[in-house]
């Protein structure tokens, strides 16, 4: 299928002919970064759903867990006038593309399916632009999780840590037992995922002031120095071969008993499940100590690029993504929780049920925050500035005091 030049979303909404709207659904070319085993298994749920509706799937995976490589590929495709049909996006990336006027309008399917009533407001902030639906959320991921080998924890004393001091004690015990205490992949987005959790553990107000409000005093002050001190401590529990390791390979270290725990978003659960492990028996899922009751989130969404010839397939894909049946089936496999509030937790395992409960309670309590590390707290320029400082510090390039000062300077420079 030859893709046409990108049309503005307003033109798409107003200009579709009746012939196009009644056309048989074509293939969808889908750009995404779900390339690990657990993620690929989850994506198959969507592929199979669309196949039953006569919509074919042209896969365009771009490896890289944070999506940066995919966004670079997308920019090149759009510049060449050859945009994919649908693209996986996060947070402010959706907003940026919507501002360029190139995303298709999904109001019709959103109205038919009553998305306004069932999609949480925090997600709609990214799914809608100027009052129009321009993306379909697939899930809600929360990022402040710790995944712990049950056998490694039993050998380290058996008690899941609930505070920073208890966390350090468990990590020390695991180190004494001869395994890598903390499995980690040395990539900027992974470093920032841990950083997010450490910042949140300093309190909801501090997370909001520093990561969302971008308050310079919070970014450079004594509490942020303590954040970097804790990051330095965590770095001491990581093995020497962590640089460049993909996140799912770090998960495999915990699964295989080579490491004690991993600090990663709930997509990691898919790797444990794919390996045949059971929550509570083989591994534990806990909130990062000090963040109980609070949640940092991101939401994978699919935005459709405004191409009239693909409109029918795009609308069918959007409807399929937000159907309650798909939301349950997909998120059970993926490790995330549904992007709509009326889905039963009956098919979810213990970690899934906990994730849904935590999300609902955090939303109610006002302690649900967009993740800086995953593009939901601040625009990409700020996120990338944070990445640079956090990774430089994690690799020993900055002292704790220097890192706090440089963090404020880096963020200020891109505002």
Image (spheres, rainbow, N blue to C red):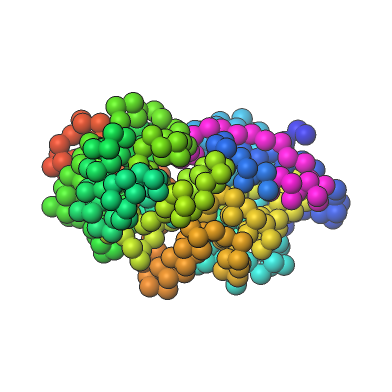
Q: Give the side of residue 161 with respect to residue 99, left or right.
A: left
Residue depicted at 25% across the width and 62% down the height: 203
Quarter of the figure that contains the N terminus: top right
Q: Give the side of residue 91 with respect to residue 155, left or right.
A: right
| Residue 249 x %, y % | 45, 33
Residue depicted at 39% across the width and 45% down the height: 151
Residue 63 colored in magenta in the image? yes
| Residue 299 x %, y % | 51, 54
- What is the quadrant of residue 310 in the picture? top right
Comparing 232 with 364, the one in front is 232
Comparing 76 with 54, the one in front is 54
Residue depicted at 55% across the width and 36% down the height: 36
- What is the quadrant of residue 62 in the picture? top right
Q: Give the side of residue 325 with respect to residue 401, left or right.
A: right
| Residue 145 x %, y % | 39, 52
Residue depicted at 74% across the width and 53% down the height: 316
In this rendering, the count of numbered labels is 0
Q: Give the side of residue 129 with respect to residue 395, left or right.
A: right
Comparing 212 with 177, the one in front is 177
Residue at the extreme top? 241
| Residue 294 x %, y % | 36, 63
- Residue 309 visible, this angle: no
- From what the image shows, is residue 56 above or below residue 332? above
Q: What stretch is highlighted in magenta?
A: 46-67
Residue 58 colored in magenta in the image? yes
- Residue 35 visible, this angle: yes
């Amino acid at each position: 299928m030859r893709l046409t030049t990108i049309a503005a979303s307003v033109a798409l909404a107003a200009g579709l002919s009746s012939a196009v709207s009644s056309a048989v659904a074509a293939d969808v070319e889908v750009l995404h970064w779900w390339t690990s085993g657990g993620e690929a298994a989850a994506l198959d749920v969507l592929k199979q759903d669309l196949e039953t509706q006569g919509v074919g799937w042209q896969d365009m995976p771009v490896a890289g867990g944070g999506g940066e490589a995919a966004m670079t590929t997308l920019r090149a495709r759009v510049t060449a006038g050859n945009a994919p049909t649908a693209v996986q996006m996060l947070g402010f990336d959706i907003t940026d593309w919507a501002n360029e006027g190139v995303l298709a309008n999904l109001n019709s399917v959103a109205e038919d399916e009553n998305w306004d009533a069932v999609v949480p407001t925090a997600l709609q902030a990214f799914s809608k632009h100027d009052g129009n639906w321009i993306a379909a959320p697939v899930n809600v991921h929360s990022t402040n999780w710790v995944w712990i080998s049950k056998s490694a924890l039993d050998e380290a004393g058996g008690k899941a840590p609930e505070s920073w001091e208890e966390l350090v004690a468990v990590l020390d015990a695991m180190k004494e037992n001869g395994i890598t205490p903390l499995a980690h992949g040395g990539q900027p987005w992974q470093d920032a995922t841990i950083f997010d959790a450490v910042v949140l553990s300093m309190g909801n107000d501090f997370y909001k002031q520093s990561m969302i409000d971008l308050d310079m005093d919070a970014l450079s002050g004594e509490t942020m120095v303590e954040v970097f001190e804790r990051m330095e401590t965590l770095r001491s529990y990581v093995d020497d071969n962590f640089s460049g390791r993909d996140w799912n390979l770090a998960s495999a270290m915990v699964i295989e008993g080579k490491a004690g725990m991993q600090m990663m978003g709930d997509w990691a659960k898919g790797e444990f499940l794919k390996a045949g492990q059971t929550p509570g028996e083989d591994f534990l899922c806990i909130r990062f100590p000090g963040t109980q009751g609070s949640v940092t989130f991101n939401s994978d969404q699919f935005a459709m690029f405004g191409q009239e010839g693909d409109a029918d397939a795009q609308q069918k894909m959007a409807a399929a993504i937000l159907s309650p049946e798909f939301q349950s089936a997909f998120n059970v496999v993926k490790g995330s929780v549904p992007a709509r509030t009326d889905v039963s937790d009956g098919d979810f395992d213990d970690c899934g049920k906990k994730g849904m409960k935590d999300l609902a309670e955090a939303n109610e309590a006002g302690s649900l925050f967009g993740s800086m590390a995953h593009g939901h707290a601040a625009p990409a320029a700020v996120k990338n500035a944070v990445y640079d400082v956090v990774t430089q510090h994690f690799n020993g390039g900055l002292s704790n005091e220097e890192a706090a000062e440089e963090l404020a300077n880096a963020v200020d420079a891109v505002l």
